[in-house]
Image: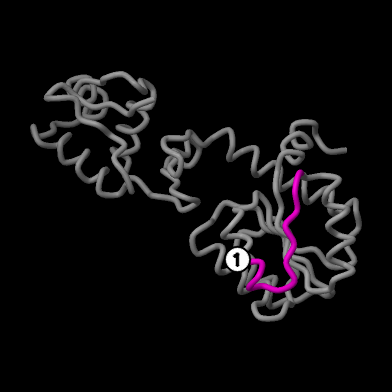
């Protein structure tokens, strides 16, 4: 039985279903609507990718063999910029080559058709668990940028931005006091406690952090210190 928080999360989620067989696509859609709020359907890989770009669904389910763009190529295109969205692949048979390839693509599961509803329910619960973890570890900074507390990195439109150890310390200190000024002295005492740092160390640290980010996040407050606005 699916945990209640996962049922609630799924009931508010959107899903993209890519399946080239019309009757199967429609019957699958009806079943999925028992779990999720909305299902976008596509008859081929190219249409699926366009729907993905337009709607940014919470979950993707795709058949492996489709016209115009295969399921494998669809997943690869999505994963170029999006490492987080839960993706499930279905197939009428077990493809060992794809199973090996799929390890690199961070799939939730590879399901062999016909898909049993018990298996579907289990896999959707796994997708919900992934969404739940992301929802509870991502701190929104701007509409397109979040900070991932669990993985210690920024995430911009699904793409991670890796940080150094000192950058992580700085960001998390500012987030702990979000909306309030953190003085340079306080920051230096916290992140350079075990080392001698030149006077320019903090300034250089902020400069390098800003270069990694797509927009202004860390604001300078005169000569006093820095703030991340609430």
Q: Is residue 214 left or right of residue 142?
A: left
Q: Is residue 142 left or right of residue 78?
A: left
Q: Is residue 146 left or right of residue 13?
A: left
Looking at the picture, how far across and down is residue 136, in whole percent? 58, 33
* Number of marks drawn: 1
Q: Let me know if residue 40 is in the magenta part.
A: yes
Given residues 31 and 173, the one toward you in this image is: 31
Query: Residue sitting at 54 percent across and 62 percent down?
Result: 79
Query: Residue sitting at 63 percent across and 72 percent down?
Result: 101
Q: Quadrant of the C terminus?
A: top left
Residue sitting farthest toward the front: 54
Looking at the picture, how far across and down is residue 129, in whole percent? 69, 41
Given residues 30 and 164, the one toward you in this image is: 30
Dividing the picture into quarters, in which one does residue 1 lie? Answer: top right
Q: State the SS at label 1.
A: helix
Residue 41 higher or lower than 118, as above or below:
below
Residue 88 higher or lower than 14, as above or below:
below
Looking at the picture, how far across and down is residue 166, in whole percent? 28, 38
Query: Residue sitting at 19 percent across and 25 percent down?
Result: 221
Residue bearing the label numbered 1: 50
Dividing the picture into quarters, in which one does residue 191 lie? Answer: top left
Dividing the picture into quarters, in which one does residue 186 lie? Answer: top left
Q: Let me know if residue 194 is in the magenta part.
A: no
What range is drawn magenta here?
A: 37-48
Task: Look at the image and name its color scheme.
Answer: one colour
Would you call the spot at circle 1 few (<14 residues within 10 Å), some (14-19), or many (20 or more)? few
Looking at the picture, how far across and down is residue 184, in whole percent? 18, 24
Given residues 136 and 18, the one toward you in this image is: 18
Query: Residue sitting at 90 percent across and 61 percent down?
Result: 27
Q: Is residue 42 left or right of residue 156?
A: right
């Amino acid at each position: 039985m699916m945990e209640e928080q996962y049922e609630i999360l799924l009931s508010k989620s959107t899903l993209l279903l890519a399946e080239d067989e019309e009757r199967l696509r429609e019957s699958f859609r009806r079943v999925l609507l028992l779990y999720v709020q909305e299902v976008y359907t596509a008859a081929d890989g190219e249409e699926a990718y366009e729907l993905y770009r337009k709607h940014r669904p919470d979950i993707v389910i795709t058949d492996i063999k489709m016209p115009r763009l295969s399921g494998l190529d669809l997943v690869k295109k999505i994963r170029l910029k999006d490492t987080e969205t839960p993706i499930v692949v279905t197939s009428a048979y077990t493809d060992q080559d794809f199973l090996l390839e799929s390890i690199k693509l961070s799939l939730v599961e590879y399901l062999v058709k016909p898909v049993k509803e018990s298996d579907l329910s289990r896999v959707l619960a796994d997708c919900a668990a992934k969404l739940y973890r992301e929802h509870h570890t991502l701190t929104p900074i701007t509409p397109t940028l979040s900070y991932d507390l669990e993985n210690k990195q920024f995430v911009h439109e699904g793409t991670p931005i890796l940080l150094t150890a000192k950058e992580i310390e700085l960001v998390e200190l500012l987030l702990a006091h979000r909306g309030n000024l953190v003085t340079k002295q306080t920051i230096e005492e916290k992140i350079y406690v075990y080392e001698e740092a030149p006077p320019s160390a903090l300034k250089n640290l902020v400069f390098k952090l800003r270069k990694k980010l797509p927009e202004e996040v860390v604001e300078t407050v005169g000569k006093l210190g820095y703030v991340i606005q609430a």
